[in-house]
């Protein structure tokens, strides 16, 4: 039972995502009848599954919600600006109820009562069906059976030569899980003209009946509308797959229907050319029955399985070890005398390297997931933040099919939440201010994802007032983050927003004012191996751009030598390399040395000295320089003994295996079997107010060397 419960909640995640996607289509106006049907099926399936586990609160709310959706799809209720917010709120609360039933959060008993009441009133206002908890107690008067669904005229059934023949019989499990054949038949009515009859021959006498055993069977014919195929019919029954007996026969081979009248021509239509032709032609022997032939959509449908994420992680780790072993083997082969190696061995090594690379890419792709679910969660954040701030806002998403490593997606939730709350609370103006500025009263927050240059770029922008840089600098000076005499560019001022404890809010509220937010964004993004940049135009809005690796398992880096040790500098921050003698190095104050490029003076950091590999500075004229650039555009030159090569390395985290090391982001294993530390370039770049030397950002170098 626990396994079934886990499976139900896994399916709920997909169903809630489908519902949220449909609500987004409703808001944008890009919906059709199938969108409403998909939303209805999602809520109905959640209700049906909840019935199997006795989740009464979830059942009651889903029932009221599906009544409203049923009114919408039957054109009794039109979606407009008045009821659309209620649909979004109902979708959010349904998701909360699912999480509460899963045990991941707690919801007060009275929470959602007003939403449930509004749903009931909305459904009753258009003459919807009786709600579950409003149904009167049954009276034992002469029994009047009311199926409670609106099918086309189901009087004398007539089969059409062009219609599908459907035989349906429900199992006990179908009713136990909350499904209703009447709703399924009504869904068929949206696909064309339906005729149905019930086979009651198996119904026993009342005294002999067993209410737990279904005995009714239905025979239906459907004359489909244009464009409706068998796949669409089967989609109606997809949520009761395995819970019923279902047979669908295509028009080419209509079955014998004993309960239906003989086939007859519809009125006012000419008779068929061959009136004496048999009613039921025999199909060619070589063609299997239509029900046994997979439809085009079935054959094109992608088969999927659910796998425990820990198994995927173990597989990725093993593939990483395979790549390291291949590099070590290649290194060993290169050190052998030339006569000891043969062309055959070299070809085999080449094939092994190519194969291990393909396996690595394939395994990494297993963890890749679209950011759609992440973006949908942010839509709720926009609505709730706008409501608390007294503003009007909507979220527009672009590129939500972009795939990102699942670990990256999970760790992006908190940073994106902070960014969106800031965009709505600080970025967007009030409706009155927007109206005075000639803007739409409703602000727009755009969230976009795309693949660029082997990385994932997520952009969040708003059409608000932009950053008030004068106020930002004033607050920074008051907090002692910068000095009045500091020469700051616009980018420097913008990046002050990422400093810990910084806030421009004059009062502490539920949304802002405590100075916790954008510093969390930067630290989380940097922990993912990414970068975050901020741009703003006064009166036009602000844009925050996050650049992330596609996966957290592999890194492109430059292997360098420092004091006899191998280090890796990520190429993400690398802008230029300079060999000894190519750089113009000048003396600066306090015995510092700077790199002169044009009219720019760039501080130089001796990487060996900063990390404690040597106690005295080396001669910079004999060292190579790596020019790196930070988020704010500030640059620093790292001095290393030599540049070895550039390669992809498998990342090994230090926090899990040892402890965080200042100045070091992670570690890797090189082809010779040695461990190489990966440099944290962000800690090597100074920021406004940090002082002249980036190395001062690091703790005692001797302690770093000891840890390393």
Image: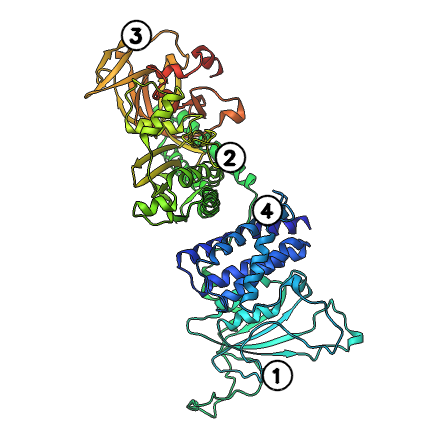
Which badge, 3 or 2, comes first in the chain's sequence?
Answer: 2
The residue at the point 55 percent across, 88 percent down is: 262
Which badge, 2 or 1, comes first in the chain's sequence?
Answer: 1
- Give residue 590's mark: 3
Which badge, 2 or 4, comes first in the chain's sequence?
Answer: 4
Q: Position of residue 636 (x, y in %)?
A: 31, 21
Q: Tell me how far mark 4 sits from mark 1, CA to CA.
A: 47 Å
* Labels 3 & 2 near each other (Cβ < 8 A): no
Q: What residue sits right under mark 1 in the picture?
A: 259
Q: Nearer the viewer, mark 4 or mark 1?
A: 4
Q: What residue sits right under mark 4 in the picture?
A: 99
Q: Position of residue 155 (x, y in %)?
A: 58, 83
Q: Tell me how far mark 3 sits from mark 2, CA to CA.
A: 50 Å
Query: Picture quarter containing residue 588?
Result: top left
The residue at the point 29 percent across, 19 percent down is: 625
Q: Nearer the viewer, residue 247 or 375?
A: 375
Q: Position of residue 136 (x, y in %)?
A: 69, 67
Which badge, 4 or 1, comes first in the chain's sequence?
Answer: 4
Q: Tell me how far mark 2 sits from mark 1, CA to CA.
A: 63 Å
Scheme of colours in the image: rainbow
Q: Tell me how far mark 4 sits from mark 3, CA to CA.
A: 60 Å
Q: Nearer the viewer, mark 2 or mark 4?
A: 4
- Give residue 318's mark: 2
Does residue 675 appear anywhere in the picture? yes
Which badge, 4 or 3, comes first in the chain's sequence?
Answer: 4
């Amino acid at each position: 039972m626990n396994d079934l419960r886990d499976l139900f909640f896994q399916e709920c995640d997909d169903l809630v995502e489908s519902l949220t996607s449909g609500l987004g289509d409703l808001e944008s106006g890009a919906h059709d009848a199938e969108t409403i049907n998909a939303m209805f099926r999602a809520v109905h399936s959640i209700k049906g599954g909840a019935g199997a586990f006795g989740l009464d609160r979830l059942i009651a709310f889903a029932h009221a919600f599906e009544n409203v959706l049923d009114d919408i799809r039957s054109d009794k209720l039109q979606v407009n600006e008045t009821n659309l917010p209620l649909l979004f709120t109902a979708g959010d609360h349904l998701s909360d109820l699912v999480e509460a039933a899963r045990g991941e959060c707690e919801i007060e008993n009275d929470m959602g009562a007003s939403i449930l009441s509004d749903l009931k009133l909305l459904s009753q206002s258009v003459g919807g069906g009786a709600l579950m908890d409003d149904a009167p107690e049954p009276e034992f008067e002469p029994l009047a059976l009311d199926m409670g669904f609106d099918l086309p005229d189901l009087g004398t059934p007539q089969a059409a030569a062009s219609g599908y023949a459907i035989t349906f019989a429900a199992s006990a499990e179908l009713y136990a899980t909350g499904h209703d054949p009447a709703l399924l038949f009504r869904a068929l009515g949206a696909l064309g003209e339906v005729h149905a009859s019930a086979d009651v021959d198996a119904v026993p006498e009342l005294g002999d009946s067993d209410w737990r055993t279904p005995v009714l069977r239905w025979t239906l014919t459907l004359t489909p509308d244009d464009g409706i195929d068998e796949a669409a019919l089967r989609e109606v029954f997809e949520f009761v797959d395995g819970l019923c007996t279902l047979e669908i026969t295509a028009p080419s081979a209509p079955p014998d229907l004993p309960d239906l009248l003989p086939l007859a021509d519809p009125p006012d239509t000419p008779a068929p050319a061959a009136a004496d032709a048999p009613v039921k032609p025999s199909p060619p022997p070589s063609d299997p029955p239509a029900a046994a032939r997979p439809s085009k959509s079935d054959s094109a449908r992608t088969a999927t399985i659910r796998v425990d994420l820990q198994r995927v992680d173990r597989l990725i780790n093993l593939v990483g070890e395979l790549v390291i072993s291949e590099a070590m083997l290649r290194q060993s082969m290169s050190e052998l005398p030339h006569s000891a190696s043969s062309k055959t061995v070299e070809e085999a090594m080449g094939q092994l390297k190519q194969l291990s690379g393909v396996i690595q890419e394939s395994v990494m792709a297993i963890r890749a997931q679209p950011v759609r679910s992440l973006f949908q969660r942010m839509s709720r954040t926009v609505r709730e933040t706008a409501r608390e701030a007294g503003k009007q806002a909507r979220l527009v998403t672009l590129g939500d099919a972009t795939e990102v490593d699942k670990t990256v997606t999970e760790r992006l939730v908190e940073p994106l939440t902070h960014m969106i709350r800031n965009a709505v609370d600080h970025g967007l103006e009030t409706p009155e201010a927007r109206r005075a500025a000639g803007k739409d009263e409703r602000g727009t927050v755009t969230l976009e994802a795309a693949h660029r240059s082997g990385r994932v770029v997520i952009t969040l922008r708003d059409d608000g007032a932009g950053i008030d840089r004068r106020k930002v600098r004033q607050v920074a000076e008051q907090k002692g983050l910068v000095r009045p005499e500091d020469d700051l560019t616009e980018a420097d001022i913008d990046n002050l927003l990422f400093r810990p404890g910084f806030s421009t809010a004059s009062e502490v509220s539920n949304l802002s004012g405590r100075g916790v937010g954008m510093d969390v964004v930067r630290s989380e993004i940097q922990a993912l191996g990414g970068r975050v940049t901020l741009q703003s135009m006064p009166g036009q809005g602000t844009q925050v751009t996050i650049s992330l690796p596609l996966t957290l398992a592999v890194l492109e880096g430059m292997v360098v030598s420092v004091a006899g040790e191998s280090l890796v500098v990520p190429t993400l921050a690398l802008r230029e390399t300079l060999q000894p003698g190519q750089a113009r190095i000048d003396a600066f104050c306090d015995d510092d040395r700077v790199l002169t490029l044009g009219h720019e003076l760039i501080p130089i950091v001796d990487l060996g000295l900063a990390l404690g590999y040597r106690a005295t500075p080396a001669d910079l004229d004999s060292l190579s320089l790596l020019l790196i650039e930070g988020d704010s555009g500030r640059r620093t030159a790292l001095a290393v003994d030599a540049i070895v090569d550039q390669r992809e390395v498998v990342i090994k985290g230090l926090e899990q295996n040892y402890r965080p090391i200042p100045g070091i982001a992670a570690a890797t294993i090189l082809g010779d079997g040695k461990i190489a530390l990966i440099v944290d370039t962000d800690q090597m770049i100074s920021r406004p107010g940090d002082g002249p030397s980036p190395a001062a950002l690091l703790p005692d170098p001797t302690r770093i060397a000891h840890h390393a």
